[in-house]
Image (cartoon, coloured by chain):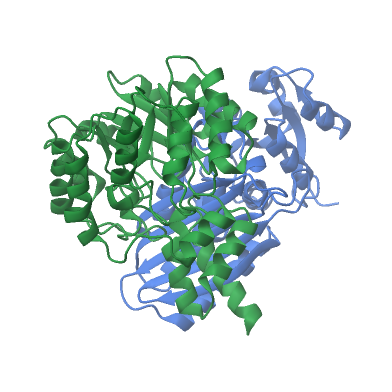
Chain colours: A green, B blue
Amino acid sequence: MDLKGKKITVHDMCLRDGMHPKQHQITVEQMVTIARAMDEAGIPMIEVTHGDGLGGASVNYGFPAATDQEYLSAVCKEMKNTRVSALLLPGIGTVDHLKMAVDCGISTIRVATHCTEADVSEQHLHMAANIDGLDTVGFLMMAHMIEPEELLVQLKLMEEYGANCVYITDSAGYMLPDDVTARVALARAELKPETELGFHGHHNLGMGIANSLAAIDAGANRIDGSLAGLGAGAGNTPLEVFLAVCDRMGVETGVDLFKAMDVAEDLIVPLMDDMVRVDRDALTLGWAGVYSSFLLFAKRSAAKYGLSSRDILVELGRRRTVGGQEDMIEDLALDMAREKA
Amino acid sequence: MSKKIKAAIIGPGNIGTDLLMKAMRSDVIEPVWMVGVVADSPGLARAAELGLKTTADGVDGMVPHMREDGVQICFDATSAYVHAENSRKVNAQGAVMIDLTPAAIGPFCVPPVNLAAAVAEQAMNVNMVTCGGQATIPMVAAVSRVQSVSYAEIVATVSSKSAGPGTRKNIDEFTRTTATGIEKVGGAGEGKAIIIINPAEPPLIMRDTIHCLTTEEPDQDAITQSIHDMIAQVQRYVPGYTLKNGPVFDGKRVSIYMEVEGLGDFLPKYAGNLDIMTAAGLRTAEMYAEEILAGRFQPEAA
């Protein structure tokens, strides 16, 4: 694979996707410290939001240590070069949240839907595209669940609603490099040439880096990852590892590799409640194609009702659950416990 | 045969047609008009076959005939954008408007919770909140009538096929209107609503999760009894309203897991989210009709 000379933009997820393994308890002070260090390391973009996006504060997903407004306003004003994004899932957050995040100083809004449901993002993308200078991104989750041709139709909808960048998101960490290549290459060939294309991976099958390289090779120019892999499931593509690989391959990221390694080792790893890694349950997510943030919910329900978390996750995959259906987990566990009794 | 109150349905789409099929079985409502805007719409043709008068000229096409045809109740199954205008026009002809759109210009009505109060107020426009609101607000109210609920949150999961273009274009309206209904009708201090659309095949039956946070330790027996009583009330008009699991008590959290299967009149059974709207709308109309028939209420032009 020859990627020499390619220029990409990396986007760190620690302070959004990383909220999942932290049960949304990262403090404002911790966020500011980490964000400053990432800015210093030259990471061009970071995401800061509740793990489930703006408005995610809930019984269903977990109440965070601070509000999105507190996190965003504290982080945005400290950034010298790094641009801050927020995530919004229509059905959870609204355009009111979007406006609030813009007022806090975000540069990018990422509007995320399930891969078949892009049309629920119309009002949000449309509004964002009409805000001067706001980088407007459409984000299609669980993209492994449909074929490249179907995915393209949905990506085009987001482009039509005003997204200047669209993402293919492997929320379950299920894809293999060929799956990524097929989706990204078709999108690159068919979307407007000026529309940027991104890939967001999860490391549940250990494929985060290989998949991200495949995405670049097929035409993606934005790549999500998180330092030390802090993210849902087995985490996102471990960013410092990916940066080192990019360096070896001659892919230009503009990030200071050693500084990024230091942030990962000195700030992110000590923050972890449990080591984010490919454990049995995270591996099951990737194998069965299950939304990565279900991980801790399945572990908790399994412990509460005396079940195997792997059994719960496999069943959630069989039922073709989608992102956001965390409420299904306790409901399913109650059914399974009754059957077992 | 007992006397019936004559009604009109505005909007011959899936919702309007399902409502028509339910209304044809009513003891107190007689649908006489179906109003559309597209001349060759299958919904208008179906209504005409069933003996209704139809017009493709919108509400204006029906207004000149409303008094002579004795239309006293109208259902609006169109969109929030045109609802206010429709409502003004039929109110001027002395008909009550039952609003199945998310426009919410009239008071909210969730039949087992506040229908009696809404009818007693003799409001000329009542709003049916949202599908998620109809499915979950009775459960919030079942808890809040036992003890104070500081916060209630609902998660409605519907199949892709049952989420129409109107809902999709303005999904924020669903979350906002439902949250307001949880507070105003459900009786929670603060309300939050989440909607998830799932494309699985075969389509999943509407699921609803209701989480209530009580101010004091929950009285488990009283809350459980209240929930079962309320479910029985909803089942009178939506037989497929089913408690799947719970109530689960965890500290001050009370969680209730529901499934809503429709009757399958015109809409498929999995679309319980749509069925509960048409059934609640009809239930509301029937209560108004009973008041009119008993001489306790005479709708008048505003």
* Number of dots carrying numbers: 0
Q: Residue at x 77, y 30 (%)?
A: B43
Quadrant position of residue A147: top right
Task: Residue at the far top: name it.
Answer: A193
Q: Residue at x 44, y 44 (%)?
A: B175
Q: Position of residue B97 (x, y in %)?
A: 58, 37
In the picture provided, is B200 more to the left or to the right than A216?
right
Q: Position of residue A314 (x, y in %)?
A: 59, 63
Q: Residue at x 26, y 61 (%)?
A: A272
Can residue B91 be seen here?
no
Judging depth in this view, the residue of A235 and A135 nearest the camera is: A235
Quadrant position of residue B217: bottom left
Can residue A143 be seen here?
yes
Judging depth in this view, the residue of A200 and B46 nearest the camera is: A200
In the image, residue A309 above or below residue A134: below
In the picture provided, is A145 more to the left or to the right than A124?
right
Q: Position of residue B95 (x, y in %)?
A: 61, 34
Q: Position of residue A246 (x, y in %)?
A: 33, 35
Task: Residue at the far bottom: name it.
Answer: A341
Quadrant position of residue A317: bottom right
In which quadrant will I find the C terminus of chain A? Answer: bottom right
In the image, residue B111 above or below residue A243: below
